[in-house]
Image (cartoon, rainbow, N blue to C red):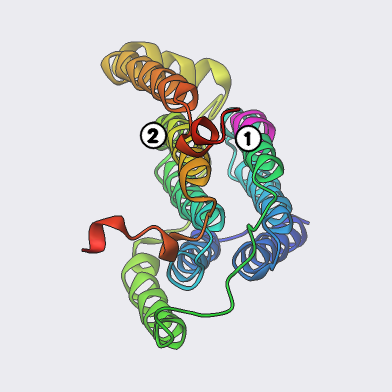
């Protein structure tokens, strides 16, 4: 039987990979994918704790995370497409109009 | 047997995660993300969450990754990484702080792990998740539909505006 700590270890590792991806990449699409990675690792932690406590609420929360992630991707990718139409770039370092 | 399945899924997930953040081309990142999502669905099955595993495959792998691939296809031009970095010290610092963050997560999170007890009857079926969703979590469920509506409206509004460059070129 795989213990809960193994799942939590995998979850923490995936979350850290997502954080590092957001910090080191400059491509807006890959930053979005890293955010998806983090959301998924949190889902894994929720499912693990639902199994550990034998309560279904953890799995219901995963459903809501899925809904919010879907909306976030739709709006975020629409923004990326819009920025690309205006600035011809998906590199977030080139989008610095607010920098002054 | 269970360990074998878990180890395969974990190795694919970690390899895919590294692939997401290191691939030079965005389409390879998207396919790595797909590998992560499918292997996480396998771990959900091991954790007796059949309904969530199905949602993961249908919504994440089926819808979100396809959306990413469509956008990558639309924005194929100049979507690579630039040669110059505006913040050259950020990458090594990101690795250092990422490692520290992982240590903090493990320090705080692994203490909460307890051995698994036998799951209750019918745990994780669509029936049980649905019963919790439509009785106990009815208000959040309705609010989720509002969020989805906001997403639809936002996507339509953002996509229907005309780009400035096209207008100047008279197309």
Q: Determine if marks 2 and 1 fall on one subunit.
A: no
Note whether B156 is above or below B84 in the view shown: above
CB-based contact (under 8 Å), mark 2 and mark 1 = no
**Residue beneath label 2, please?**
A61
**Residue beneath label 1, please?**
B67
SS at mark 1? helix
Q: Residues within 10 Å of mark 2 (few under 14, many from 20)?
A: some
Front-most of residues B27 and B1? B27
Mark 2 or 1: in front is 1
Question: How would you classify the magenta stretch by its main secondary structure?
Answer: helix
SS at mark 2? helix
Note whether A84 is above or below A25 in the view shown: above
Residue B122 quadrant:
top right
Q: Is residue B62 magenta?
A: yes
Q: Is residue B77 magenta?
A: no
Q: Residue at 67% across / 56% down in the picture?
A: B26
What are the residue bounds of the magenta stretch?
Answer: B55-63
Residue B158 location (% of width, % of height): 43, 27
Q: Residues within 10 Å of mark 1 (few under 14, many from 20)?
A: some
Front-most of residues A49 and B62? B62
Residue B128 location (% of width, % of height): 49, 19
Residue B17 quadrant:
bottom right
Quadrant of the frame with the C terminus of chain B: top right
Quadrant of the frame with the N terminus of chain B: bottom right
Q: Residue at 46% across / 20% down in the picture?
A: B156
B69 horizontally vs A76: left or right: right
């Amino acid at each position: 039987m795989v213990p809960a700590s193994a799942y939590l270890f995998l979850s923490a590792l995936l979350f850290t990979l997502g954080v590092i991806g957001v910090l080191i990449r400059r491509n807006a699409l890959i930053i979005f994918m890293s955010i998806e990675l983090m959301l998924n690792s949190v889902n894994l932690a929720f499912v693990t704790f639902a199994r550990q406590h034998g309560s279904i609420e953890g799995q219901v929360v995963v459903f809501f995370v899925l809904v919010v992630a879907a909306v976030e991707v739709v709006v975020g990718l629409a923004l990326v497409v819009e920025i690309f139409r205006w600035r011809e770039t998906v590199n977030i370092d080139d989008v610095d109009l607010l920098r002054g | 047997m269970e360990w074998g399945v878990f180890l395969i899924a974990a190795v694919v997930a970690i390899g895919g995660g590294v692939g997401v953040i290191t691939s030079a081309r965005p389409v390879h990142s998207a396919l790595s993300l797909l590998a992560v999502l499918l292997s996480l669905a396998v771990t959900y099955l091991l954790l007796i969450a059949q309904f969530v595993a199905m949602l993961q495959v249908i919504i994440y792998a089926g819808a979100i990754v396809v959306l990413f691939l469509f956008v990558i296809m639309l924005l194929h031009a100049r979507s690579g990484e630039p040669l110059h970095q505006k913040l050259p010290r950020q990458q090594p610092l990101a690795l250092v702080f990422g490692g520290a963050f992982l240590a903090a997560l493990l320090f705080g999170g692994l203490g909460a792990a307890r051995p698994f007890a036998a799951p209750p009857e019918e745990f994780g079926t669509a029936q049980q998740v649905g019963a919790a969703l439509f009785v106990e979590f009815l208000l959040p469920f309705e609010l989720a539909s509002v969020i989805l509506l906001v997403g639809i409206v936002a996507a339509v509004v953002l996509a229907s505006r005309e780009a400035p460059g096209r207008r100047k070129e008279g197309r």
